[in-house]
Image (cartoon, rainbow, N blue to C red):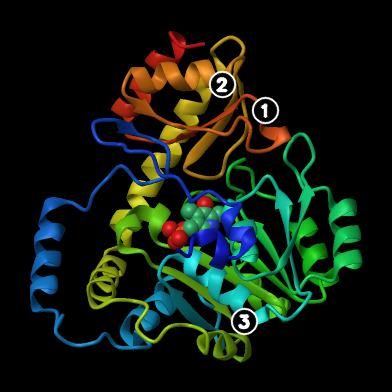
Amino acid sequence: MIEPIDLIRPELLALSAYHVPDSSGFIKLDAMENPYRLPPELRAQLAEKLEAAFINRYPDPTATQLRERLIETMGIPAGFDVLLGNGSDELIQILAMAVARPGAVILGVEPSFVMYRMIAGFCGMKYVGVPLREDFTLDLRATLAAIKEHQPALVFLSYPNNPTGNRFEIDAVGDILQAAPGLVVVDEAYHAFADDSFMPRLPQFPNLLVMRTLSKLGLAGLRLGFMAGRPEWLNEFDKVRLPYNINVLTQTAATFALDHLDILDGQAAALRAERARLSAGLAALSGVTVYPSEANFVLARVPDARKTHAALKAGGILIKTLHGAHPLLSQCLRFTVGTPEENDAVLAAMAQSL
Ligand SMILES: *Cc1c(COP(=O)(O)O)cnc(C)c1O
């Protein structure tokens, strides 16, 4: 009898699948979701739109209306276009598939978003991870040296960075863009919560791609990511994209949501204010170090991450432990910013769980 070990690529056999814990019944603060829904009257309007959608037909393969709405609302500079993905995870995969020539390298910093490394592996590419400094800032000298040595086809920078929450220095990212022989993807998944964006700088850097997602903004269930860049690049990546990757319901719902972006932006503003309150509350606990965040989560170092994580879970609160994920993240926990009530629950539970 044939077994997986006979057929499956050895590097896949060695991996474990991306694990998502069962969250039913928990205060769910482990995945950077927006805790707020659309207001009831908008949900009713959305229901009408979805009711009218032609789910018997294949979707518009290029999602023209949705792309135009994104270009209008997301500050895409004139002359640049966007490519859509089933989440930005799919865009990372499209990029990797497109550049995966024999020996091609993806370079990132560590710790950062795990999908860069995982997808490099899926596509048979080499991944080079350059450690951040202890305060999670870029080690620019080491990064530039690694770029020179490995000549990466793609560099990924999460801006702000997940899971550390900080945003890298603008000039350092500019230096990386100048030095990179290939493309640099600035992943702005947390744009709604950050104080800077590389989107307006697209015209300055011919090798820059700016990637965003609607997931952290409040539409994680729709699975929509987009990447802005020069049409010359996007036209090539479009060849690897599967024709109907953005389904009819997502195209309809995302276009509707972008018509009401003020609501989502208002929710993001409320979450930023809560981020400040949650950060201050955690920092006031003895033995807890809180790192500055421009995202909708807060990274904190505690005396015993395993114990605190388990105690919160026993109290019905799900957060993410990063202890063991990378040496720089020893004893670190990541808290998604929730509603004021949820954050109060976290602070009360934390006071009992250290
Ligand atoms: C969450 C996240 C993504 C993935 O977002 P999806 O659009 O939901 O696939 C990409 N990059 C970073 C840095 C993230 O934190």
Classed neighbour count for the residue bearing mark 1: other residues with Cα under 10 Å, few (<14), some (14–19), many (≥20): some
Which label number is shown at residue 305?
A: 2
Q: At 60% from the left edge and 77% from the top edge, which residue is drawn?
A: 97
Q: Is residue 191 above or below residue 286?
A: below
* Residue at 32% from the left image edge and 28% from the top image edge: 342
Residue drawn 59% across and 16% down? 304
- N-terminal of the pair, mark 2 or mark 3, is 3
Q: Which residue is mark 3?
A: 98
In the rendered structure, which amino acid carries the disc numbered 2? Ala
The quarter of the displayed image where residue 347 is located = top left
> Within 10 angstroms of label 2, few (less than 14), some, or many (20 or more) residues?
many
Q: Are marks 1 and 2 in contact (CB under 8 Å)?
A: yes
Distance in Å between CA atoms under marks 1 and 3: 35 Å
The residue beneath circle 1 is: 330
- Cα separation, mark 2 vs mark 3, equals 39 Å
| Towards the viewer: 198 or 208 | 208
Mark number for residue 93?
none
Residue at mark 2: C-beta within 8 A of ligand 1: no
Q: How many numbered circles are shown?
A: 3
Q: Is residue 265 left or right of residue 260?
A: right
User: Dot 3: within a 10 Å radius of its alpha carbon, few (fewer than 14), some, or many (20 or more) residues?
Assistant: some
Question: In this orientation, which residue lies closer to the viewer: 340 or 35?
Answer: 35
Q: Secondary structure at mark 2?
A: helix
- Compared with 239, 181 (above or below) is above
Contact flag, marks 2 and 3 (Cβ < 8 Å): no
The image shows residue 313 at horizontal and vertical percentages of 38, 23
